[in-house]
Image (tube, rainbow, N blue to C red):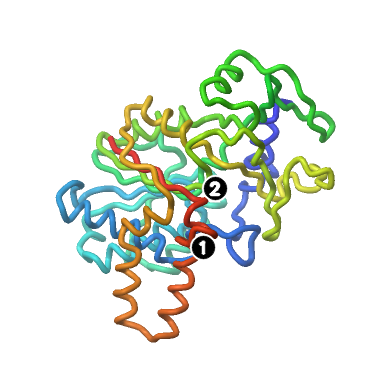
C-alpha cells in the first residue's frame, strides 16, 4: 500500500483518528491556537469586522470555517462580531464545512449550548455544495492533515506488514521534488483539488488559514505522531505503527510554497504570508487584550495575557506557526 493511502486510512478510514469527534487541548493529544485562547478567533474576527466596516466586504458576507472540529473558532469569531457590531448576526450567515457526520453532530450540540437559538449554524459536507456571492473562509491546522507521500532521493514509501518499504518514485513525484528543491520529506496530496474547490465555492472570497511549517522544503522528514501530548518521531525504532494506527494523530510540517502555488493556480491572489505572531498582532490581538484589561480584574487579564503570549511568543507558537491569506 502506498503511504498516502495508509495515512488516509489512519486519519479518515472506518477506524480513523478523525472519524469520530476527539477532544483537543488538555484532555486530548495536542493543543491548537484555538484551544489555547478565544482571543485567537477574536483577532481574526476583528480583521473581518474591519473589512466589512471599510466596505471591502458586504454585510451579507458568509463566514465559513473548514475543518472546524467542535466549532470553537467560528463560535469565538461570532462572539466578537456581536461585540463589534451586533447587527452582523442578522445580516451574515455562518457555516461549517465538515465531512464527518459525528463531528457535525458535536458542532450542532456545542452551538446549541453556547448560543441557543440566537445563532443559526449551517453545515455542508463539502465545499462543492457551496455557490456563494461573498465568503470569508477560515481554517486552522488543516493542511497538515492532508495525506502525503514520503520521499527520499528518488524513492517513496509503501507500507507492507506495518513496515516501511521504499520503491522508485514516479515521474510526477520526482518532478515535485525538483520543483521544490527537495531531497527528502513529505509530498502533500490534495492541495490543488482543495484550492480549486474553495476558489469555485464563492465568486468573491477571502481565505485565512494557520498551520505549522515554512515557505520552503525542509529536506528532512517532519512526519510525527501526537499521543497524550507526547511527540513521537515516525521513524523512531520504538514506534510500532499498529499500536498507534487510528489512535494517535499523524501529521507533518506544511510546505507553504506548495500551498501558495496551488491557490494561485486556482485563481486566488496571495495577500500575505507571515508568522502567526505578526498576523495576530496585525489583526489587533494586543488592542483586544487592552480593551479586555479595562473591563476585567487584574487576575483575569493576566490569565488571558499568558494565553496570548503562548500564541505569539517566538519560542512557542508565534514563529513556528504561519498564516497565509488569499483573496479572489
Q: Percent from the top left, x then y, of residue 132? A: 28, 39
| Inter-mark Cα distance, 1 to 2 | 22 Å
Tell me what residue is drawn at x 34 percent, y 42 percent: 272
Image height of 143 relative to 306, above or below: above
Q: Residue furthest top?
A: 171
Q: Which residue is mark 1?
A: 35
- Residue 236 versus residue 251: which sits nearer the camera? 236
Image height of 122 relative to 43, above or below: above
Q: Percent from the top left, x then y, of residue 71? A: 46, 57
Q: Percent from the top left, x then y, of residue 110? A: 47, 63
Tell me what residue is drawn at x 53 percent, y 57 percent: 32
Q: Nearer the viewer, mark 1 or mark 2?
A: 1
Q: Which residue is mark 2?
A: 101
301 on left or right of 142: left
- Residue 323 versus residue 316: which sits nearer the camera? 316
- Residue 87 versus residue 123: which sits nearer the camera? 87
Tell me the crowding category of disc 1: few under 14, some 14 to 19, or many 20 or more residues within 10 angstroms, Cα based: some
Label 2: element kind: helix
Q: Are marks 1 and 2 in contact (CB under 8 Å)?
A: no
Indicate the quadrant containing the N terminus: top left, top right, bottom left or bottom right.
Answer: top right
Label 1: element kind: helix
Amino acid at each position: 500500500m502506498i503511504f498516502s493511502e495508509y495515512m488516509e486510512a489512519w486519519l479518515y478510514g472506518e477506524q480513523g483518528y478523525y472519524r469520530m469527534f476527539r477532544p483537543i487541548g488538555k484532555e486530548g493529544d495536542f493543543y491548537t491556537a484555538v484551544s489555547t485562547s478565544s482571543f485567537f478567533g477574536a483577532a481574526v474576527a476583528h480583521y473581518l469586522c474591519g473589512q466589512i466596516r471599510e466596505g471591502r466586504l458586504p454585510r451579507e458576507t458568509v463566514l465559513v470555517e473548514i475543518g472546524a472540529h467542535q466549532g470553537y473558532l467560528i463560535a469565538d469569531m461570532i462572539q466578537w462580531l456581536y461585540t463589534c457590531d451586533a447587527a452582523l448576526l442578522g445580516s451574515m450567515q455562518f457555516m461549517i464545512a465538515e465531512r464527518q457526520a459525528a463531528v457535525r453532530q458535536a458542532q450542532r450540540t456545542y452551538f446549541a449550548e453556547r448560543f441557543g437559538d440566537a445563532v443559526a449554524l449551517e453545515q455542508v459536507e463539502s465545499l462543492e455544495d457551496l455557490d456563494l456571492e461573498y465568503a470569508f473562509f477560515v481554517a486552522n491546522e488543516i493542511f497538515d492533515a492532508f495525506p502525503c507521500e514520503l520521499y527520499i532521493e528518488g524513492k517513496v514509501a509503501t507500507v507492507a506488514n506495518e513496515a516501511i518499504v521504499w520503491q522508485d518514485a514516479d515521474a510526477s513525484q520526482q518532478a515535485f521534488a525538483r520543483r521544490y528543491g527537495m531531497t527528502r520529506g513529505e509530498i502533500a496530496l490534495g492541495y490543488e483539488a482543495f484550492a480549486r474547490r474553495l476558489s469555485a465555492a464563492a465568486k468573491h472570497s477571502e481565505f485565512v488559514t494557520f498551520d505549522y511549517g515554512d515557505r520552503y522544503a525542509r529536506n528532512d522528514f517532519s512526519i510525527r505522531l501526537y499521543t497524550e501530548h507526547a511527540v513521537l518521531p515516525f521513524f523512531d525504532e520504538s514506534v510500532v505503527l499498529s499500536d498507534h494506527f487510528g489512535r494517535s494523530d499523524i501529521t507533518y510540517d506544511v510546505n507553504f510554497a506548495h500551498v501558495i502555488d496551488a491557490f494561485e493556480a486556482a485563481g486566488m491572489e496571495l495577500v500575505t504570508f507571515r508568522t502567526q505572531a505578526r498576523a495576530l498582532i496585525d489583526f489587533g490581538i494586543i488592542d483586544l487584550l487592552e480593551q479586555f484589561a479595562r473591563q476585567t480584574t487584574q487576575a483575569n487579564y493576566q490569565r488571558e495575557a499568558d494565553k496570548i503570549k503562548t500564541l505569539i511568543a517566538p519560542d512557542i507558537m508565534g514563529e513556528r506557526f504561519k498564516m497565509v491569506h488569499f483573496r479572489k
